Image: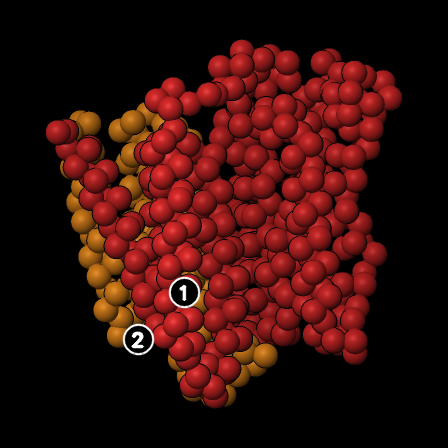
Chain colours: A red, B orange
Amino acid sequence: MSIATVFEIALAAVVLGLAIWTIAVPETYSATVGFVAYGLLVALIWVRLDAVDVALTEAAIGGGLGGVVLLGAAARLRDAEATAAERPDRSTRLIAAILSASIAAALAFAILILPDYAPTLAPAVVANAGATGMANPVTNVLMAFRGLDTMLEKVVLLLAVVGVWSLASDRAWGGRPGPRHEADPNGVLAFLARLLPPAGIVVGIYMLWTGADHPGGAFQGGAVLASMWLLVIMAGLADTPPVSSRWLRFILVAGPCLFLVVGLGGLCFGAAFLAYPVAFAKPLILGIEVAMILTIAATLALLLAGAPERNT
Amino acid sequence: MTEFLTAAVGLILTLLALGLVSILRGPGDADRMMAAQLIGTAGIAVLLLLGTVTGVRAAVDVALILALLATFASIAFVKKGLSRLESDGVGSAEGK
């Protein structure tokens, strides 16, 4: 057994142990910290499995934005937890545990009965990489071969924002999401919020650009841009935009709309819905991705900012 | 050289596991958050070393994302956890 295998087994054991602890720990705040650390470690495992695209997404969502969403939920629940000491009774918890365990068992069973050579389209994807002029097979699948799925996913993201906004009270409708953050303008946080975003914006654009030929893409880039925007907001250097503002709504629909327009263009001038003309495939896909990175950044940031709650 | 780098990965993974112990033990939220920070930094080091050892160049990109997002997450932890760390006062505006 090589030394690398020993590391891999140790890493897997540590991740499993951390996952069990995250579920078992009673305090929500501790569980959130555990979940963020879990996301970081799972990203390491994805790199080890040569799935760098997945590792990028896991690092951005599992280790970063997802943890912050859970943190916001934990902060809101904290007051409720303090006042109501009520806990779900034994049978409820038992039923929840049985349900979760049976889902995990079903997943494990499904993986175990997979044939040794699972049916795969991977060779076909690699063979047709030339059709779009891009070398990253994941981007090819997401933007060209299964473009419809990606387009509908972006619409789902938009619906999620509508869902979050609909939680606003009538009085606050059209207002700004989240509290107005205050911080010492000469403090460490404000300094970091001035220092980090320029580097973060470059990394976000780099992620989009490198996604054509190497792991990366609009989603990972958008997640980085969203976190940089939220950093500036949390440091009190900028305020969240009112949800009634026209430019914000325009950015939110820009990505899916451009995707839809290009798709309909394929229907009119090409073979099928979302069929790119071979000569313009790469510029068209890049154009969609540029609109998409802005939409994704705005969507993720607004999902984290929450429902509108104030008018000033 | 590869053996040396692999040994370095092993050393950092060990330190990372020690950081996990600190997350488990606590006792305070601030201790847990600092341990999560340490794990983020150690994860970046492991990714950079792994990328060199196995020749996966894109591991550097994952390290970049991790560096930015881990910083962001720890700031959010401080901002949102503040009202709990300091029972009232400065942090109370964040919990709204």
Q: Is residue B90 visible?
A: no
Residue A144 to residue B9: above or below = above
Quadrant of residue A135 within the rendered picture: top right
Mark 2 neighbour density, 10 Å: few (under 14) some (14–19) many (20 or more): few
- Residue located 49% across and 15% down the image: A123
Residue A144 to residue A256: above or below = above
**Quadrant of the frame with the C terminus of chain A:** bottom right
Measured Cα–Cα span from mark 2 to mark 1: 32 Å
The chain holding disc 2 is B
Q: Which residue is mark 1?
A: A95
- Residue located 65% across and 35% down the image: A149
The amino acid type found where label 2 is placed reads Gly
- Residue located 79% across and 76% down the image: A170
Q: Which residue is mark 2?
A: B28
The amino acid type found where label 1 is placed reads Ile
| Residue at the outermost left position | A1
